[in-house]
């Protein structure tokens, strides 16, 4: 199995803080050897948090149709840290029309783990697979089937199933683009068992921006600015992803795009692991649901003496996702500072109740049988925020106690 080398990997084995001081300069890792374009018949593996991972979510949105948090919060990410591992290519992505998880023989694998900050710009970034302005973080590359006699990939239209893993942070991870602050947070991630960490600030704009001031009613005493530090312990495997780069080729029945990656004899191709950053904040488990931040701000209501309180995911443990309350036990209601999108469901109103749809509640407090609380609800949504080449759906296997 191929493993990319790093000049500073020895230092990494002794801890990320040591690496940060010895191997970083001007916010980037001097020791990181960004993969070069593998050329015709090869593939470059990258990762992206789309434009909002770097630009955040403005409120109000700059243009109609731009993603935004409908309850008036403006979101800025300092860091979005994630660990990837085991990027794979397999034969026969269309092996089972009704079961996307099934593929043919594994022919190539690149092993990490790799620690990546999707909110960080770096000189090694490449153009992303989405709209102009999106960037991808290069992780590694392949130009042959390293588990199949190093044969070249077919370039006759044959497609290979693409898979990857999101895993718990590890002290042995190769730090792809972490600056010193990210390295410090990543060390804490390792201790806490996080797979994904969101660090940033939410600022309520609905009460101060002309045309949106009325949506502040009923929220007296709420903080205007909230820092967030959200640790998601949600390792998961993603298999046989659909690939929008294959459009307009006809997909299998019930799917949006053809599965797999087809190689070219004239150029390299890209396999971009894409995060949808607002998915942990959705109000239901349905794709494209509106994003809200009130549920997190509510958990620091009443924290006297803290000008900018910090909310953590752990503060939502034990909070009923279907009857949400603030930190003082008071029920809260939905608020919309702008009309929410209704592609997924009609607008919610009244008491805040997150919609788990087809996902059951836990039986006897067992997280493997269902959702226990909002902590589980948010983690469930977050665990499926990964796609191929912008929005290609993958077969998901959650590798933590969770309902299917």
Image (tube, rainbow, N blue to C red):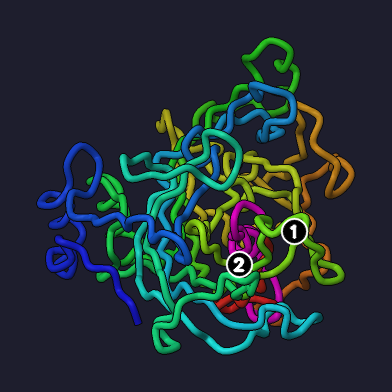
For the C terminus, which image quadrant? bottom right
Q: Which residue is mark 1?
A: 285
Tag count: 2
Q: Which residue appears farthest toward the right when viewing the image?
A: 346
* Position of residue 132 measured from the top left corner of the image (x, y, whole percent): 56, 34
Q: Which residues are magenta?
A: 366-391
* Position of residue 62 measured from the top left corner of the image (x, y, whole percent): 64, 21
Q: Residues within 10 Å of mark 1 (few under 14, many from 20)?
A: many
Nearer-the-camera pick, 4 or 54: 4
Measure how far apart labels 1 and 2 are at the Cα level: 31 Å
Q: Which residue is mark 2?
A: 262
Relative horizontal placement of residue 188, taking residue 55 as reference (left or right): left
Q: Quadrant of residue 348?
A: top right
Examine the rendered structure and indicate whether residue 270 appears above or below residue 212.
below
* Position of residue 202 measured from the top left corner of the image (x, y, whole percent): 52, 33
Relative horizontal placement of residue 168, taking residue 98 as reference (left or right): left
Q: Which residue sits at x=60%, y=67%?
A: 261
Is disc 1 in contact with disc 2, using a CB cutoff of under 8 Å? no
Q: Which residue sits at x=18%, y=66%?
A: 9
Examine the rendered structure and indicate whether residue 23 appears above or below residue 69.
below
């Amino acid at each position: 199995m191929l493993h990319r080398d790093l000049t500073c990997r020895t230092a990494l084995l002794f801890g990320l803080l040591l690496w940060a001081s010895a191997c970083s300069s001007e916010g980037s890792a001097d020791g990181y050897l960004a993969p070069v374009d593998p050329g015709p018949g090869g593939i470059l593996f990258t990762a992206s948090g789309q434009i909002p991972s770097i630009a955040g979510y403005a409120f109000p949105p700059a243009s109609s149709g731009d993603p935004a948090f409908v309850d008036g919060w403006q979101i800025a990410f300092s860091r979005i840290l994630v660990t990837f591992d085991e990027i794979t290519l397999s034969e026969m992505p269309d092996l089972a029309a009704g079961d996307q998880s099934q593929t043919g023989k594994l022919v190539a694998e690149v092993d990490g783990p790799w620690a990546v900050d999707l909110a960080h710009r770096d000189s090694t970034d490449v153009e992303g697979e989405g709209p102009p302005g999106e960037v991808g973080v290069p992780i590694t590359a392949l130009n042959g089937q390293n588990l199949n006699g190093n044969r070249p990939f077919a370039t006759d239209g044959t497609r290979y199933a693409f898979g990857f893993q999101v895993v718990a942070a590890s002290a042995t991870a190769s730090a792809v683009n972490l600056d010193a602050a990210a390295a410090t947070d990543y060390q804490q991630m390792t201790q806490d068992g996080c797979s994904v960490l969101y660090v940033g600030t939410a600022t309520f704009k609905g009460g101060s921006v002309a045309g949106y001031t009325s949506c502040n009613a009923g929220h007296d005493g709420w903080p205007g600015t909230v820092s967030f530090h959200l640790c998601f312990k949600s390792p998961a495997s993603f298999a046989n992803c659909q690939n929008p780069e294959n459009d307009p080729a006809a997909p299998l029945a019930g799917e949006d795009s053809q599965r797999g990656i087809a190689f070219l004899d004239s150029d390299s191709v890209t396999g971009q692991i894409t995060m949808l950053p607002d998915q942990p904040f959705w109000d239901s488990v349905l794709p494209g649901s509106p994003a809200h931040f009130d549920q997190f701000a509510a958990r620091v209501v009443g924290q006297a003496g803290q000008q900018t309180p910090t909310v953590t995911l752990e503060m939502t443990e034990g909070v009923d996702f279907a009857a949400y309350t603030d930190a003082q036990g008071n029920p809260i209601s939905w608020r919309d500072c702008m009309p929410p999108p209704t592609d997924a469901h009609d607008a919610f109103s009244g008491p805040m109740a997150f919609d788990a749809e087809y996902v059951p509640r836990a039986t006897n407090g067992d997280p493997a049988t269902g959702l226990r609380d909002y902590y589980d609800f948010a983690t469930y949504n977050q665990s499926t925020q990964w796609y191929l080449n912008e929005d290609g759906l993958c077969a998901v296997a959650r590798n933590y106690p969770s309902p299917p």
